[in-house]
Image (cartoon, rainbow, N blue to C red):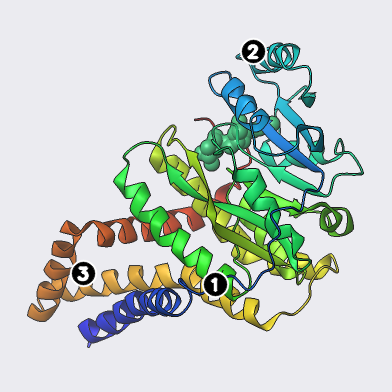
């Protein structure tokens, strides 16, 4: 009985995401975009780079933006630094003195309140004529045509937000398995209508939506809640497949994974109601379906696995032979990397929900 219940839960836990993934991959991955892109559409863009102790990366980052294949007079750059102690603002000033034709503004916050508050603060400095606002992490590297290609999607008036796919610069295969799975899911969801996530390395928004609706500012809000929020306005929030940006894996992988999972969970718990409260919410059937499946996968599904494991352990303890076999089988499967990556992700989500009760991470050390 216990073993049967455990198996049923495990079955639901594994088949829902697999069925969803298979459906997306076979039905949507190779479909063309139902979006009118225009490579000649050249609106005014503001690129916002939040920095906290980015001395190692900031000059290369500015070089990257500077050398984009996009008219330089149409690009404003805002660096918002929050009390870095490694000389980041000085490097920005030095870089600007060497690139006087860049429209760069440096904003220095006297104290560190976190990335979210920094980029919301930076929005106050965006020129009114800007049509597109792009947020990008200092450690993210864009290929020279990234901006050009991403902006082309905004020529379609239904598009409100565009985010890039992410690849990793080192050979961290765990992270690459995780990314290649999620990149596919996000792109398929985007082709259907919208995806509930944005990636910090490259997230672009139609500025008028930000002026009209703001961006979610609840504690723990981040890239993913920005994406969901714009999707809830009825505009499309998409991840695209022809813009890929590179990000190194920095600091403790474990802490970073937990932090990101915390943000994802808060997104699924809060953003929909937040959009309603702000009067920004518009019902879009295609996106609602995607939202509730992803909600299930992030909020409910990990717990099914946990309960299933606990039941099997109890049954094994009681001396049930079948449960012992099931337990050993479940553990043996860990030799397969994708399975291992999946199980790890479930553990991150579980630990993250517990940690959310204690703290909504707003600042972090690397
Ligand atoms: P991860 O990619 O999620 O591991 O996060 P990172 O540590 O790379 O941070 C993402 C971006 O936010 C980087 O450009 C950081 O410099 C920046 N950042 C992090 N915390 C703060 C902060 O408190 N203030 C500002 N202005 N930027 C921050
Ligand atoms: Mn980063």
Which of the four quarters of the rendered structure image does ligand 1 lie in?
Answer: top right
In front: label 3 or label 1: 1
Residue located at (42% from left, 37% from top): 249
Does label 3 or label 1 sit earlier along the sequence?
1
Instruction: Please provide percent x and percent y for residue 319.
Output: 9, 75
On the image, numbered disc 1 is attached to which residue? Answer: 32
Mark 2 Cβ inside 8 Å of ligand 1 = no
Image check: 177 left or right of 365?
Answer: left
Kindly state the secondary structure of the residue where label 2 is placed: loop
Mark 3, other Cα within 10 Å: few <14 / some 14–19 / many ≥20: many
Name the disc covering residue 242, or none: none
Residue ID at (76%, 69%): 158
The residue identified by callout 2 is 87
Foreground disc of the pair 3, 2: 2
Q: Is residue 305 left or right of residue 144?
A: left
Disc 3 from disc 1: Cα separation: 47 Å
For disc 3, the marked residue is 313
Where residue 235 sits, quadrant-wise, is bottom right
- Residue at image coords 77%, 68%: 233
**Dot 3 or dot 2, earlier in sequence:** 2
């Amino acid at each position: 009985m216990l073993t049967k219940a455990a198996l049923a839960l495990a079955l639901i836990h594994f088949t829902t995401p697999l069925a969803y993934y298979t459906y997306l991959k076979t039905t949507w991955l190779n479909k063309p975009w139902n979006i009118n892109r225009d490579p000649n559409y050249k609106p005014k863009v503001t690129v916002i780079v939040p920095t906290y102790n980015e001395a190692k990366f900031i000059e290369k980052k500015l070089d990257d933006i500077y050398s984009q294949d996009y008219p330089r007079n149409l690009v404003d750059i805002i660096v918002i630094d929050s009390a870095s102690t490694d000389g980041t603002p000085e490097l920005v000033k030095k870089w600007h003195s060497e690139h006087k034709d860049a429209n760069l503004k440096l904003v220095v916050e006297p104290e560190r309140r976190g990335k979210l508050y920094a980029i919301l603060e930076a929005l106050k400095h965006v020129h009114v004529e800007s049509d597109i606002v792009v947020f990008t992490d200092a450690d993210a590297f864009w290929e020279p045509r990234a901006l050009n290609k991403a902006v082309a999607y905004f020529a379609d008036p239904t598009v409100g937000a565009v985010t890039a796919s992410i690849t990793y610069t080192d050979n961290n295969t765990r992270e690459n398995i995780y990314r290649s799975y999620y990149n596919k899911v996000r792109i398929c969801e985007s082709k259907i209508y919208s995806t509930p996530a944005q990636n910090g390395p490259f997230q672009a928004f139609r500025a008028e939506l930000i002026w009209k609706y703001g961006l979610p500012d609840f504690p723990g809000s981040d890239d993913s809640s920005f994406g969901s929020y714009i999707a809830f306005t009825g505009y499309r929030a998409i991840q695209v497949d022809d813009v890929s940006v590179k990000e190194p894996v920095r600091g403790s992988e474990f802490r970073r994974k937990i932090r990101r999972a915390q943000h994802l969970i808060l997104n699924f718990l809060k953003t929909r109601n937040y959009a309603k409260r702000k009067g920004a919410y518009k019902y879009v059937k295609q996106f609602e379906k995607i939202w509730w499946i992803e909600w299930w996968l992030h909020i409910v599904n990990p717990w099914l696995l946990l309960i299933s494991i606990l039941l099997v352990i109890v049954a094994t303890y009681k001396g049930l032979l079948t449960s012992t076999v099931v337990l050993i089988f479940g553990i043996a499967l860990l030799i397969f990397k994708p399975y291992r990556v999946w199980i790890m992700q479930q553990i991150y989500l579980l630990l993250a929900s517990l940690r959310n009760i204690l703290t909504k991470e707003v600042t972090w050390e690397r």
